[in-house]
Amino acid sequence: MSHRPHDLAAEFPEMVATIKSLKAADAHFARLAAEYDEVNDRIHRAETNIEPVEDLAMVDLRKQRGHLKDEIYAMLRAAQPTS
C-alpha cells in the first residue's frame, strides 16, 4: 500500500504501539480507526484526482476526519500510562 498523508501512525508517531494495542483490545477504537482510514483514503483519492469530489464534499470529509482524529487522540491520551 502506498504512503498516504495523515495516516494515524504519521499523525501520532509517538503512540504507534498504543494505536496497535487499542486496535486489538478495544472494538470502539478499532472501528474509529477504520473509519478514519476510510475517510482519509477518500480525501487522498480526491486530492490526487483519482476520484475527484466537489469542494463542499471535500470540506465535509476534512471535517469528518478532524472529528475522528480528535476522538482517537482523546482515547490514545487516556490509554497512555501516567508518570
Image (cartoon, rainbow, N blue to C red):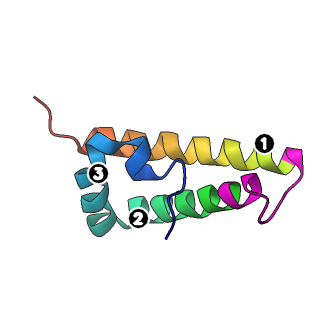
Q: Which residue is mark 1?
A: 59
- Whole-Å distance between the Cαs marked 2 and 3? 14 Å
Q: Which residue is mark 3?
A: 16
The numbered mark, 2 or 1, whose residue comes first in the sequence reads 2
Mark 2 against mark 1, which lies toward the viewer? 1
Percent position of residue 18, x then y: 25, 52
Percent position of residue 16, x then y: 29, 51
Badge 3 marks a residue whose secondary structure is helix
Q: Is residue 40 left or right of residue 52?
A: left
The numbered mark, 3 or 1, whose residue comes first in the sequence reads 3
Q: Quadrant of residue 75?
A: top left
Q: Indicate the amino acid at tag 1.
A: Val
Q: Is residue 30 left or right of residue 50?
A: left
Q: Indicate the amino acid at tag 2.
A: Ala
Of 71 and 13, the residue lying toward us: 13
- Residue under the image location 55 percent in, 48 percent down: 68
Mark 2 against mark 3, which lies toward the viewer? 3
Q: Indicate the amino acid at tag 3.
A: Val
